[in-house]
Amino acid sequence: MPKVIKAYVRYVDALNRRLGIAVMYLIFVMMGLLLFASLTRYVLHIPLVWVIEMSQFLMAAYYILGGPYSMQLGSHVRMDVLYERWRPKTQGFWDSLTAMVMIFYLVVLFRGGFASTVYSLEYGQRNYSAWAPLMWPIKAIMTAGIGLMILQTISIFFKDLAKFMERDIA
């Protein structure tokens, strides 16, 4: 494989690995936030209206930003009815085909997310709740996560293509 493709794969994998490891710790932030909400509600009798919504936003950031790292590790769901019986070259062919379809889907999703984020910024969109937070920060995080997923899918495509061509990409 050309050096530029190898460099791309190394860079994107490193970026998503670091971000994925950092984002894993958001689970503790969510746990702390929900524990804080429970204590204030049942011990101090002060219900906080923003906590549940904030934990939902954190959860969305957690799985959207952690998705590319999950793909990199291969820990996503795969139906192995026929796949595991195929030769690596055949697996590489079908994986690269699947990656192209996924890239198309993610680009459409990214365009929608970007348009929605721009709309939120232009009109100061707020959520319909008692807290009424601005929506653009979570929409921007989700759009960025989809962008990172596109980059990781392209990296996976190159790896699968190398597998199909029986070449080394490392």
Image: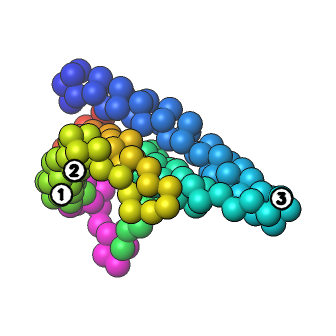
Circle 3 is placed at which residue position? 44
The quadrant where residue 150 appears: top left
Q: Position of residue 115 (x, y in %)?
A: 17, 47
Q: State which mark lies toward you, 1 or 2.
A: 2
Check if residue 110 falls in the magenta segment. no
Vertical comparison of 4 with 128: above or below: above
Circle 2 is placed at which residue position? 116
- Image quadrant occupied by the C terminus: top left
Image position of 166 (left or right of 18): left
The secondary structure type at the circle numbered 2 is: helix
Q: Are marks 1 and 2 in contact (CB under 8 Å)?
A: no
Kind of residue at disc 1:
Tyr
Residue 105 image label: 1
Tell me the magenta residue range: 80-94
Please tell me which of labels 1 and 2 falls first in the chain: 1
**x 43%, y 45%: residue:** 65
Kind of residue at disc 3:
Leu
Q: Residues within 10 Å of mark 3 (few under 14, many from 20)?
A: few
**x 79%, y 63%: residue:** 45
- The answer to which of 24 and 37 lies nearer the viewer is 37
